[in-house]
Amino acid sequence: MAASGTVIHMRTVPGKPLHRALDKPLFCMNMDGSAGEVPADFEWDGSSVPVLLQPFFPRHRHPIASCRHDWRCKHARNHKERKWADQEFKKDVGRTSWKITAQAGYAGVRIGALLGIGNRW
């Protein structure tokens, strides 16, 4: 497993031990292929993992992937954009973890999409 080469500057949010916030912007490619960023102070809650699986998939094991995914989901306007956000999550996790971990994470976010978790439409 190779490092992603991306550095994330984050902090724990006071009073919200499961949340993190960015100290500096984080590069984040947009769906149209243009360069974008998740702004400083964006707050997210890590990967939403069922309690029984948390020993194997800790909430903040992939902070870059979960931060970008939450940002993309927040701004997704339809199912196509949500699916793209989920596919990018899989790529991000795959840059720093095993292929099976990326596939399991992707399955989790797709189930979340099907259940309407994080959807605004």
Image (tube, rainbow, N blue to C red):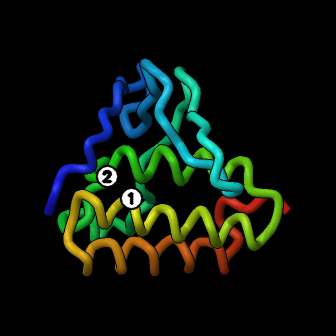
Name the amino acid type tagged 2. His
Q: Is residue 24 above or below residue 7?
A: above
Indicate the quadrant containing the C terminus: top left, top right, bottom left or bottom right.
bottom right
Residue density around tag 2, few if under 14, some if 14–19, many if 20 or more, within 10 Å: some
**Along the line of sight, which residue is nearer the eye, 56 or 61?**
61
Q: Residue furthest right?
A: 121
Res. 11 mark: none
To which residue does mark 1 refer? Answer: 92
Residue at the (33%, 53%) spot, across then down: 59
Q: Is residue 12 above or below residue 119?
A: above
Residue at the (19%, 50%) spot, across then down: 3
Q: Is residue 29 above or below residue 89?
A: above
Counting the numbered discs, the total is 2
Q: Position of residue 8 (x, y in %)?
A: 34, 32
To which residue does mark 2 refer? Answer: 62
Q: Residue furthest left?
A: 1
- Lower sequence index among marks 2 and 1: 2
**Along the line of sight, which residue is nearer the eye, 24 or 59?**
24
Residue at the (19%, 64%) spot, across then down: 55
Q: Measure the C-alpha gap from mark 2 to mark 1.
A: 8 Å
Asked if the residue under mark 1 is in contact with the one under mark 2, i.e. CB atoms within 8 Å, the reply is yes
Q: Position of residue 45 (x, y in %)?
A: 47, 44
Residue density around tag 1, few if under 14, some if 14–19, many if 20 or more, within 10 Å: many
Q: Is residue 68 left or right of residue 77?
A: left
Q: Position of residue 39 (x, y in %)?
A: 58, 26
Name the amino acid type tagged 1. Asp
Tag 1, which secondary structure? helix
**The quarter of the displayed image where residue 2 is located:** bottom left
Q: Is residue 93 left or right of residue 117?
A: left
Q: Position of residue 91 (x, y in %)?
A: 40, 65
Indicate the quadrant containing the N terminus: top left, top right, bottom left or bottom right.
bottom left
Tag 2, which secondary structure? loop
